[in-house]
Amino acid sequence: MSRCAVIVPVLNRPQNAQPLVDSFKASGADADLFFVASSGDTDEVNACYDTGMVVMTLDRPPGPADYSAKIQRGYEATEEPLVLLAADDLIFHPGWLEAVEKIAYEYDCGVIGTNDRANPLVKAGKHSTHPVVRRCYIDKYGGVVGEPGVVYHQGYDHQFVDVELVQTAMQRGCYAHAHDAVIEHRHPLYDRKVASDATYKKGQAKGLQDRQLFESRKHLWLNERELGVRAQPG
């Protein structure tokens, strides 16, 4: 067993599979990468298998909460102590895992932010689009208030799952940011060289509804703060 499981939900972007794995291998991290695809997404599934990595499938149509459901599928099928909540549009830089571990154990935190070199809040250390979670933290407290063992709230269509996870951890005093853990996010919102596609458009389609749901759920982690809840991952 490696030190970290890298969970990569994928959908209809078979061309991204091999470049992602090449970047992952070049980073030299003591980690294992797991793809989670939709069972009917044949070209994607085949491309992922061709990389030599482990491929899991989700046996349901890629509808609402596809990303968060695939993260949960990968989380439950692995056992590494650290889990990177990844995607197929990332570039791994050498030393990312060591930087994560240094912060995780120095601050004894359950959610560790990585540096995507894209989102302004991420670069400021106030958010993480692709964080690493400690399994002991998720198993005991959950990334979602009142749901031990659950990484992301699956009521969102796509957006704000990461925001809820990070803000919940912050309110619990259990978040720290690893600025030196560089995992670039090549997303069309931040990189003009990256073209949008059907998968990106699917993820952005219900942003307003996702934001409204996020606002309606804020009381959950704010109430934890008022009650003095402070999670300790170990």
Image: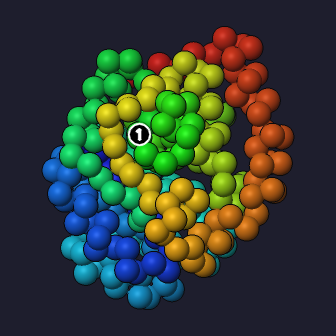
User: Can residue 193 be seen in this snapshot?
Assistant: yes
Say which residue appears at 34% left-offset and 25% top-offset.
Answer: 103
Estimate the x, y position of residue 123 in percent, counting from the top left: 48, 37
Estimate the x, y position of residue 88 in percent, counting from the top left: 41, 65
Residue 27 position (above or below residue 10): above
- Viewer-proximal residue among 51 and 122: 122
Secondary structure, mark 1, is: strand
Q: How many labels does the image show?
A: 1
Residue 208 position (above or below residue 133): below
Say which residue appears at 49% left-offset and 26% top-offset.
Answer: 175
Residue that extends furthest to the front in the rendered view of this protein: 192
Residue that extends furthest to the top in the rendered view of this protein: 228
Say which residue appears at 65% left-offset and 59% top-offset.
Answer: 158
Name the quadrant containing residue 206. bottom right
Residue 14 position (above or below residue 211): below
Q: What residue type is labelled 1?
A: Thr
Estimate the x, y position of residue 38 in percent, counting from the top left: 50, 77
- Viewer-proximal residue among 18 and 121: 121
Label 1: which residue?
A: 114
Estimate the x, y position of residue 68 in percent, counting from the top left: 57, 57
Say which residue appears at 52% left-offset and 74% top-offset.
Answer: 195
Picture colour scheme: rainbow
Query: Where, quadrant-wise, is the C terminus in this rendering?
Result: top left
Q: Residues within 10 Å of mark 1 (few under 14, many from 20)?
A: many
User: Can residue 142 be seen in this snapshot?
Assistant: no
Name the quadrant containing residue 100. top left
